[in-house]
Amino acid sequence: MRICRFLDSENQAQYAIYESDRICPISSFAEPPASSKDIFERGSSWLASLPKPQPEQWQTAPERWLPPVADPGKILCIGLNYRDHAIETGSEIPTEPVVFCKFNTALIGHGATIRLPNISSKVDYEAELVVVIGKMAKHVSVEQAADHVFGYTCGHDVSARDWQKGRPGGQWLLGKTFDTFAPLGPCIVTADEISDATNLRVRMHLNGDTVQDSTTAQLIFPIAELISHLSQIMTLLPGDLIFTGTPPGVGAARKPPVFLKPGDECTVEIEGIGKLTNRCEAE
């Protein structure tokens, strides 16, 4: 099943079932969840148990999409997790996951605007598969990891390279978490609908041109290993997000480099999940 979150005509945030470019608000045919966490804790089996929406309850796709996770406790991101991407940046192949974070203020939904900050001139794009945690995970094994996944969505790890690497000590956190630097959506596809998350095609289209194109089969640390590794350090909770890394082709590695500018349109496309599109404007 696919679920999304949107603003209705009264500016109220709602969850909906998403299907074939149309939506059915959960509130129109069932008791809506109290929170995002409530949805993820209940899991896909609860969604499957909901009454079948009636034809008249379906609506056209919303004009105002919201990030499909309302208030994640953690937004964890994995750096240099595609071998070719690590090579193109001149970095050594990591021997364990490189982890950083974004804050909730970076989240925006499908169709929202990426604001290019005045204090950065090297804002880059990164298409990523994002894991949504559905069940608390602490000290889980690789074999147990899949049981803790609610679903998957498209993410864009927008990155200010001149902050990430060009500041004293390297400011990964600051370079990655400017406001609007974490587009997410448009929907979450529940894990039961993704037969093999270890081999999904991940692409970034910049103004219609494909600039990144790989599959999750190229991950240095697959999803199950990431969940197990992170759970040894922290407790993963329902609604937590894991950005799993980006393929080669980022703008900073191109010759000459390509950085985002006002008017650019970025589309993350992930096989079996959909397309996440956002335009850029100057702050």
Image (cartoon, grey):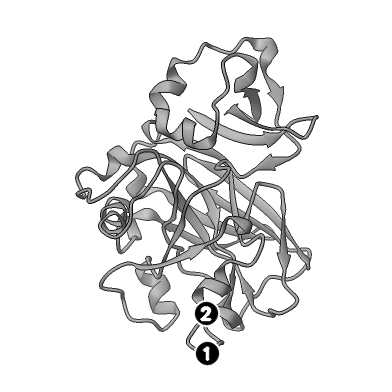
Which residue corresponds to the image point at 52% horizontal and 11% vertical from the top-left?
51
Where residue 132 sits: x, y (%)? Answer: 44, 44
Q: CB atoms at circles 2 and 1 under 8 Å apart?
A: yes
Disc 2 marks a residue whose amino acid type is Gln
Q: Nearer the viewer, residue 149 or 281?
A: 149
Neighbour tally class for label 2: few under 14, some 14-19, many 20 plus, Cα within 10 Å: some
Which residue corresponds to the image point at 69% horizontal and 80% vertical from the top-left?
121
Which residue corresponds to the image point at 54% horizontal and 62% vertical from the top-left?
157
Relative to residue 156, is residue 94 drawn left or right? left
Q: Nearer the viewer, residue 160 or 214?
A: 160
Q: Which mark is residue 220?
A: none
Res 164 quadrant in image: bottom right
Which residue lies under the disc numbered 2? 171
Where residue 73 sits: x, y (%)? Answer: 48, 50
Please indicate, yes or no, whether residue 19 appears anywhere in the rendered image: no
Disc 1 marks a residue whose amino acid type is Pro
